[in-house]
Image (spheres, rainbow, N blue to C red):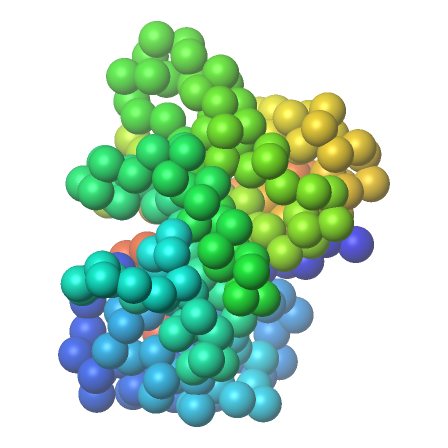
Amino acid sequence: MRQQIVAGNWKMNLNLQEGIDLCKTIIALTSDATRKVIISAPYIHLASLVTLCKGTNVKVAAQNCHHEISGAFTGEISPAMLADLGLEYVILGHSERRAFNAETNSLLAKKLDAALSQNLKVIYCFGETLEERKANSHLDLVTQQITEGLFHLEADTIKNIVLAYEPVWAIGTGETATSFQAQEMHTHIRKVMTAKYGSEIAENCSILYGGSCKPTNAKELFSQTDVDGGLIGGASLKATDFVSIIKA
């Protein structure tokens, strides 16, 4: 049975004390949550948050890692370092890193391998721009991102992958995919996974929606058959909003 997950991506926000305070509030308000809760924070927060979240319902994720385990890569962070901190998850392939850091599917495939080699679970992100959707190429584009990023993996490793569909045109724009659009794409994603790995693995793979999910639309989005939760950006920076989404 696939997990229901809500992951908050703080992006490049909050100083250390603000992050600690927000995490404490989220922990206090989600002790009875039925969904798995993940906080993805900037690197400066990770050690503190791992300590705070130990023994709670909340897990901690990094927002990125390098594709090598060690070496002369100034300013980068190794998946081995993240694992040593006690992290369980790392986000890879977020649309902002694809756009601003020129991360390709082939590079992300290497990052996936590196993260999995350190026993990290990966939240693998993908999705189309507005231009790609208007050109009606969004299904093919997402298929390519999944195929080139994931399909070198053996079937028994897929249990360590959470998929996150991000309609790029709905991130930080105030636009949101309709529940129909979200379900349509998530159905497609599960079909793509089924074709490669079979129905049992595909049915047990969690697929999150990541595109301006808010307390006002979370319930409708999460009610869709193939939407297994959300990757939340701006709303994860306010405890009441984030918890409302978790409990939607």
108 over 38 or under it: above or below: above
179 over 56 or under it: above or below: above
Residue under the image location 29 percent in, 63 percent down: 71
Q: Nearer the viewer, residue 214 or 11?
A: 11
Query: Residue 1: x, y in percent?
Result: 79, 54
- Image quarter where the C terminus lies is bottom right
Q: Image quadrant of residue 195?
A: top right
Task: Identify the residue at the far front of this view.
Answer: 71
Q: Is residue 95 visible?
A: yes
Residue under the image location 65 percent in, 70 percent down: 34
195 over 239 or under it: above or below: above
Residue under the image location 58 percent in, 90 percent down: 55
Query: With 79 as the anchor, is 152 left or right in this view?
Result: right
Q: Image quadrant of residue 201?
A: top right
Q: Nearer the viewer, residue 130 or 124?
A: 124
Q: Nearer the viewer, residue 37 or 154?
A: 154
Query: Residue 126: x, y in percent?
Result: 43, 36
Residue under the image location 52 percent in, 50 percent down: 113
